[in-house]
Image (cartoon, rainbow, N blue to C red):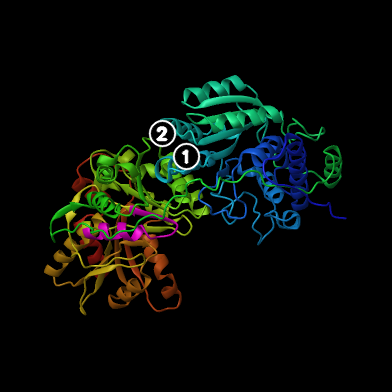
Amino acid sequence: MATPVSEVVGVADLETVQELAQQLRVDSIRSSTSAGSGHPTSSMSAADVMAVLLARHLRYDWDNPDDPANDHLIFSKGHASPLIYSMFKAVGVVSDEELMTGYRRFGHRLQGHPTPVLPWVDVATGSLGQGLPDAVGVALAGKFLDRTPYRVWVVCGDSEMAEGSMWEALDKASFYGLSNLIAIVDVNRLGQRGPTELGWDMAAYARRVEAFGARALVVDGHDLGAIDAALADAEDAARPTVILARTRKGEGFSEIADVEGWHGKPLTGDMAERAIVELGGERNLRVRGPVPPADLARPEHQARPAFTLPTYELGAKVASRRAYGQALAAIGAWTDVVALDAEVSNSTYAEDFTKAHPDRFFEIFIAEQQLVAAAVGLSVRGYVPFASTFAAFLSRAYDFIRMAAISQADIRLSGSHAGVEIGADGPSQMALEDLAMMRAVGGSTVLYPSDATSTAKLVEVMAGLRGVSYLRTTRGAYPVLYGPDEQFVPGGSKVLRSSDADTVTLIGAGVTLHHCLAAADVLAAEGVSARVIDLYSIKPVDAATLAEAARATGGRLVVAEDHYAEGGIGGAVLEGLASALRDGDVSVRLAHLSVTELPGSGTPDELLDFAGISTPHIVEAARGLLR
C-alpha cells in the first residue's frame, strides 16, 4: 500500500525538516539497495544539511528549472547521487517509481553520478574536486554579468578537500569576492578506504578555509537548528562562506554509522529493512521550499550586434595567436561572449579582449583547472566563454576538459605556443600532446589554423559551436595565405596547390603547412607536382578531400606535424581514410613526419629540422614515396 503524500508549501518548520531528513535517508537506502550499487552512507551523512537547505533556504522554482533567478545547487560530491535524487523525489519532479526502478539502470536518466540530462543538474560531477570550481564560474556570472542575487550552493565531500582544485576555487572565489557562493563540506571523517586526511579536525579545516580568504562556519551537521542558523548567516555574508558540517557517515542506522568499510556499498535487503525501521519507516513527504521572489531581477537577453573581423594583407607575417586575440576582441561585440586567461594574456593575446571589454574578462591566474572550470560554470548561465593559456598547460586541466564534455558544456579553449616551433623555452613549454588530448574528448572540435585569416574566421565559428572546441595557435609569425572572403568550417580543409599532374600529396597544419608549401616549390623545380592540403580541421577531419587526394596522387601522402606521432594529424588522416581503405576505394603509402625524440632548446628552425618536420625532410619524404 502506497504511503499517502503529505505536502508542505513554502518554508517548512524544523519538525517537518526532521521528517524530510529521515525520508532522504530512507530513500537513499531504498534506491541504492534496489539498484545493487551506490553510495547510501555518503548520502545519509549529509541528509540533515540538505533537508534544511531544501526546505528553508534554496530558492528554486521546481516547475521552471530554466528560471534564471533560481539558486544553483551543485553536488561536488557527485557519488552522493542517492541523496540528490531523493531530494528530487521530495520536491515532486522524480517519482518514487523512477527512483526505485531507474537509478543506475541502463537507458535511464538517474545515472550513478548526476549529469545535466536532468534539468535540475547544472554540471556533471563525480570526478572529485570539480563541483566547487565549476560553481565559481556560475557565481562569477551572477555577480559580474547577470548581476542577479541568486546563490550558488555547493555540497562537497571531505575527501575531495585533498584536491588542489578545491583550494584553487576558494582562492579565486575570495579574490573576486563571491559572497553568492556557499560551500557545504560534509565532514563525515571516512573516505573510500578509511579515515580522511584530517578526519574530524574541524579547526584545521577552518584554518585552511580562512587562509584562502573565505569564511568558515563550523556546525554540528546533525543539529537542524545550528544548520539553519549557519545557512542563514551564509546568505548575508560579504565574502564566500564554507560551512564545515561535522557529520557521521551512515547516520541514522546504528549498525553502520561511522563504521569503516561501507563506502560505495549498498545495504543488503535485510539490512535495508532494519535501517528503514530504525529511521521510522518510509515516508512520502512533499516539500518544495522557497522560490525566487517575483520581483527578483532576471537577466536580459544578451545582445548580438554585427561586428567586423580583422583582415590581413596577403603575405604579411602575423602570428595566429595575435589573430586570435584580435578576433576575440571583435566578436566581443556580442555581450554574451566572455574571455578568461591564466596569466599569460600578453602571450595568448587575450589581452586584446581585456582592453576592449574589461567587464567581461576574468583573470584566473596560474590555475588552469579553475580556468576550465570557470568556463564551464559561465556556460551554465548561457555565456560563450573563451579560455586561453599555453597549450602545454591545458594538460594539467585535462580531467576538467573531459568532464566538461560529460556536462554537455559549450566551452572554447585556445592553446598557444604549441610544438617545437616555440624555440628556446624548451620541452616543458612545448605542447606535443595537445591534439591527441583534445581529439580524445567526446564530441570535441579541434582546429589548427595556419594563418591569421583562418584563425580569425575560426574564432568566429567557435562562438557558435556546441561542446568542447579547441584552437591551436602558433607562437611565430607566418605569411597570410587567405583573403578575407575565404570561409572555414569544422570538417573542412583547403587545397592550396593542385593540378591534374599531382603525384604526391603534402598535408600540414599550422607551421608545417608553410613548410609543405616550401617543399612543394622545391619539388616543382625538380619537375614533381605536389598537391598541398591545409588540414585546419583536425576533428572532424575532411575525409572526402583526403580520399580524393589519395586517389589523385597514387596514395602517396606525406603528413608533417609539430606534435608527437601518437594521436595527432597523422592519426586523424588515417582515421579519416579508414572507410575508403576498408572499401578498397583508395590505397595509401603514408610518410608520417612528426616529433619522435625529446627536444631541447634552440631556434625554431633548428628545432623543426631536429624533429624532421622542416622543408628538406618533407621534400625527402616525398622523393622516397616516388622512388
Q: Position of residue 346 (x, y in %)?
A: 25, 40
Vertical relation: 581 (above or below) 541: below
Residue 458 belongs to magenta span: yes
Check if mark 1's residue and mark 2's residue have beta carbons within 8 Å. yes
Q: Position of residue 401 (x, y in %)?
A: 46, 48
> What residue is shown at x 79% (from left), y 51% (from top)?
5
Give amino acid for label 2: Tyr
> What residue is shown at x 13% (from left), y 61% (from top)?
314
Vertical relation: 412 (above or below) 250: below
Q: Where residue 176 is drawn, which disc sits there?
A: 2
Q: Quadrant of residue 271?
A: top right
Residue 565 visible in the current orientation: no
Q: Where residue 604 is drawn, which disc sits there?
A: none
Residue 593 visible in the current orientation: yes
Among numbered discs 1 and 2, the one appearing first in the sequence: 1
Judge from the rendering whether residue 317 lies leftward or rightward of residue 391; answer left or right.
Answer: left
Q: Within 10 Å of the Cα at label 1, are there few (<14), some (14-19), or many (20+) other Cα atoms?
A: many
Give amino acid for label 1: Val
> What residue is shown at x 72% (from left), y 54% (from top)?
99
Which residue is denoted by mark 1 in the rendering? Answer: 136
